[in-house]
Image (cartoon, helix red, strand yellow):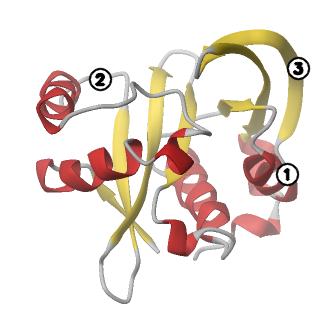
Amino acid sequence: MSLQLLERDHLKKRVEFLNDPEVQRTLNFDYPTSLAKTEAWFSKNVLASNRVDFAFTRNEDTAVIGFGGFININAKARKAELYIFVGDKNCWGKGFGRDGYKLLVNYGFAQLGFERIYLYQLAENERAVKATSALGWTTEGFLRKDIWSHGELKDQYVLSILREEWEGNGLYAAL
């Protein structure tokens, strides 16, 4: 699996994934979305200094299987919020999400110089909870009824990993 900077060519696949009800269940993106709306979002954000977005591709065939990146980049504090989703349901339960976290965290610390990477995770997203726990993320808090998602208030966790934790964690060896 590899990261590719998000390009206009990836947007049709992003829309397909975001409009899939099973994929959307664990996300808080606008739903449903359109290609026109996604292209406008892309045009607005592609040069933004406070974010970087990627497509995840399989190495063997370069098929796009998901997306992720960093938002709310704070260069002074050397931190950012990570987001990730695997939209290709044929890849679910096969370690692609875990590998996506690894790729993004490695990039954030090694290439962008972050000291802290954090994320918000719906409490009901058991796959994501399991993946971040296995990769050494620390749960910093449980936010009760914190986010409006799919017609109801939902609980979410805030988690983080620090540079020194990443450096001492053999789970992030090069993929």
| Mark 1 vs mark 3: in front | 3
| Mark 2 vs mark 3: in front | 3
Q: Is residue 57 above or below residue 147?
A: below
Q: Amino acid at mark 1?
A: Gly
Q: Which label sits on residue 49? A: 2
Q: For the residues marked 2 and 1, what is the alpha-carbon distance in whole angstroms?
A: 28 Å
- In screen coordinates, is 38 left or right of 102? left
Asked whether the residues under the numbered discs 1 and 3 touch, taking CB atoms below 8 Å apart as contact, a structural biologist would say no
Horizontal and vertical percent for residue 38? 21, 33
Q: Amino acid at mark 3?
A: Phe
- In screen coordinates, is 125 left or right of 115? right
Which secondary structure lies at badge 3? strand
- Foreground of the two, 108 or 86: 86
Horizontal and vertical percent for residue 131? 77, 56
Residue designated by label 1: 136
Q: How busy is the neighbourhood of tag 1: few (under 14 within 10 Å), some, or many (20 plus)?
A: some
